[in-house]
Image: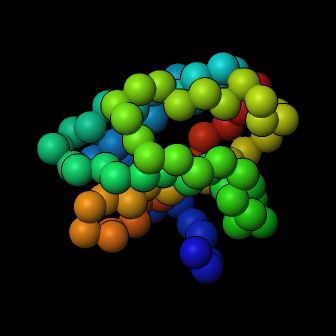
Amino acid sequence: LSGIENNPATNKIIRVYPNPSQDFLYLEQQDLLPIKQYQILDIQGKILLENIWKYEPIKISTLPAGAYFLNFQDKDGKNYTTQFVKK
C-alpha cells in the first residue's frame, strides 16, 4: 500500500467500534461486503498485523497506544481503509 489515507466512504460500508479501543475492535458491515483479510498499519504505513478475517473481533491489546489504519481487502482485491485509535 502506498499513500495510505482514511477513506470516508469506508465508514459507510464498515463500522469499526469502539473507537478509541483498548483490547478488541468489532466490525459491523453495512453491506454484505465479502471481506477476505485485514491489515493494521502504523501511521508510516508499516504492516503490524495481517490476517484472514474470520468474522471475529480483532485483538489489538498488544499494540502500543496511538493512531492506526485498518485496511480491509475484499474477495475481488479491492481495499477499504479506515482509522482507529488504540488507548
User: Is the N terminus in the top left, top right, bottom left or bottom right quadrant?
Assistant: bottom right
Q: What colouring does the structure picture have? A: rainbow
Position above or below: 10 against 31: below
Identity of the residue drawn at 66% across and 20% down? 23
Q: Residue furthest top?
A: 23
Q: How many numbered badges does the structure rendering display? A: 0
Q: Farthest residue toward the right?
A: 64
Residue 8 visible in rendering: no
In this view, which residue lies farthest toward the bottom?
Answer: 2
Query: Do we see residue 69 in this rendering?
Result: yes
Q: Position of residue 6 (x, y in %)?
A: 53, 60
Judge by depth and name the residue closer to the eye, 68 or 60. 60
Residue 81 located left or right of residue 15: right
Where, by quadrant of the figure, is residue 61 drawn? top right
Locate residue 32, reporting x and y percent: 15, 44
25 shown above or below 74 = above
Q: Where is the C terminus found, in terms of image quarters? A: top right
2 or 49, nearer to the observer: 49
| Residue occupying image coordinates x 45% and y 35% | 16
Q: Give above or below for 9 relative to 25.
A: below
Residue 73 screen position, x and y as percent? 39, 60
Percent x, y for residue 67? 72, 45
